[in-house]
Image (tube, coloured by chain):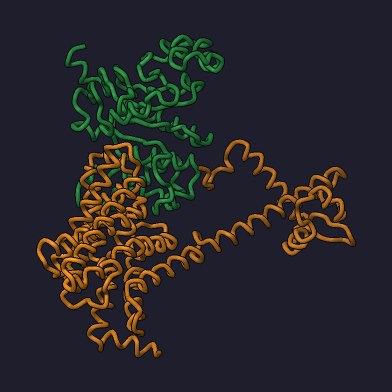
Amino acid sequence: MNATSYKDLPVSVEDLTVAYRYEPVLWDVDVDVPQGTLMAIVGPNGAGKSTLIKTVLGLIEPAAGRVSIYGESFKEQRNRVAYVPQRGSVDWDFPTDALDVVMMGRYGHLGWLRHPGADTRKLAMEALEKVGMQKYANRQISQLSGGQQQRVFLARALIQDAEIYLMDEPFQGVDATTERAIIEVLRALQGRGSTVVAVHHDLETVPEYFDHVLLLNVRAIACGPVEDVFTQENLRKTYGGRTDMLAAATKNVNGNP
Amino acid sequence: MDLLKLFSLLFTDYTVRNVALGSAIVGAVSGTIGSFALLRKQSLMGDAMSHAALPGIALVFIITGLKTPVALFLGAFGAAWLGAILIIVITRYTRVKEDSSLGIVLAVFFGFGLVLLSWIQRNRGANQAGLDKFLFGRAAAIVEADVIVMAVIATITIILVALFWKEFKLLAFDVDFAASLGFPVRVLDVLLTTLIVMGIVVGLQVVGVVLMAALIVAPAAAARQWTDRLSTMVVISAGFGAFSGAVGALLSSLARGLSTGPIIVLTASAIAIFSLFFAPNRGLIWDWLRQRSNRNRLAQDRVMEALYIMASNHGDPTHPHGLENLAAVLPHYNVKATLEKLGERGLVSMRGKYWSLTDQGVQIVEELQNDTHAAGEGSMLEGKAST
């Protein structure tokens, strides 16, 4: 691959190795995320899915390898990347409301010593509307359901106004309403040319929700369009032979290719 | 004791005024930074840092022979800060978890401090008088110069918190997200920790290393009970801290032998305990009342539903049934009391020994059933915390 084509790749990961002490969490991973795709990252627990996202975001220092965002380092491209962390990573009993959490998505744009004002508030309200949460703007965040909290996190990423959205398990433990709302947002993001990479747990919905998939288990087992790489063979390699559930997951793909 | 007379001491008695003012400032600073410590789950860090200050105080005295407030302040600050940084470093770079590293630093520093204190006691004799007061504080000895130092540090703390408000808030709520936005979270962590150290060190001469952590935790924990907004919480917490400081100082001036530091801590603790029980929404009493009313409401719904289902067998939703029949269907409910409450709400009526749903009651049961059907599709989850 030559240097110019990197510039067209939203996320390019090369020979990435991450280790906690001597235990490799990611081993020699290569991933190219093409422009405008919705890519799922699937793999068993401990496969390094979250670690991969955090390493792309510079939150974890890799032992080896390189991450580039449109051909440059994440630091230089920070404003083009939005992040939705795992819902369980924060304490939802924090004294604040939904609107305030969403406004945090603009803190990076504001820079030092400047406080969010009316324009930020307006952006945050619009983002809450997009995820169907405008009614809950002033609700204390611990009073929200798990799905609603997830939508607040999504709205916070939306007002980052980025081109690449990295999401860690956005569908984890959400209700049907939230799942539909998130899918709608993902489609809208794709529609305006953004790229989405999401850690996903529900194998059955991969073909329905995503067009690309990365099968990860410490190593990158396969990466590409869902219809090409989301096969029983690859899933078996990723999950290690628990074929019963895998057969069910791939039937969508094999049934209507 | 006449309250008015006590209050007038504030204005007429020079010593009382300085002690009260100094204690109030210390309380306000503790309350402000304590809010952040509490939300970052670093309450115990405050305890470790205050204990870690002791060897610094002793070392400064051994090396320089000085007992001036500024010298001792710098010694305490240096040691507490070193302790705090050690905790951060140990947690980040070793397998030791944060609670263990807190324990290690607290024990090692405080133990070293006690060793130095006893060495000073043996070798410097009478000259050491005053140093051991850092163990429990020496609020009664606060003079105007101390108050000025405290006020300066309080001002610096409050200005820094205001300047870095959104950064500190984000750091406390979601550190990874803050880092992904490009905020230097380690620098901010050290800055916030430094502010906490500063607040603690100012408080040391009032409440001492042993009790200082309480003044960091109690006002913040109390304030959290009364509000769901960070800014309000910080202001209330500072207010509680200042109030505890002033009240503690005044109370201890009433009688000989009441030391100020412990009284301040007791006052702050009393506020915290009251808040834990009685604050609206988050208080335990409130919780208990809400649970009881939920239970009653649930029992009422179940009884109405049972009446509805039994009556529907007769083709008429208002068909009456005896108490015994209902009680047999719902053995774990106090059916009689529940029916009486429903009667008060006009949802059931009694004819002779028989109870039946009113038209309004029928309507409510039918709405209820629609709701429960919808719950199967997940909409009942809306508005409830289900983590």
Q: Is residue B317 left or right of residue B115?
A: right
Task: Return the x and y of residue B369 as percentages of the image width and height.
Answer: 70, 44
Task: Return the x and y of residue B82 as percentages of the image width and height.
Answer: 21, 51
Task: Please determine whether, in this image, residue A150 is positioned above or below residue A120.
Answer: above
Q: Is residue B251 left or right of residue A114?
A: right
Identify the colour of chain B in the image: orange
Task: Return the x and y of residue B213 as percentages of the image width and height.
Answer: 33, 61
Residue closest to the eye, A52 or B314: A52
Q: Is residue B378 left or right of residue B256?
A: right
Which residue is painted at 26% across and 86% down in the image? B11
Task: Please determine whether, in this image, residue A116 is positioned above or below residue A224.
Answer: below
Which residue is painted at 44% across and 14% down in the image? A230
Task: Return the x and y of residue B153 as percentages of the image width and height.
Answer: 19, 65
Q: Is residue A54 left or right of residue B270?
A: left
Which residue is painted at 42% across and 61% down in the image? B227
Residue closest to the eye, A48 or B376: A48
Residue closest to the eye, A167 or B207: B207
Identify the colour of chain A in the image: green
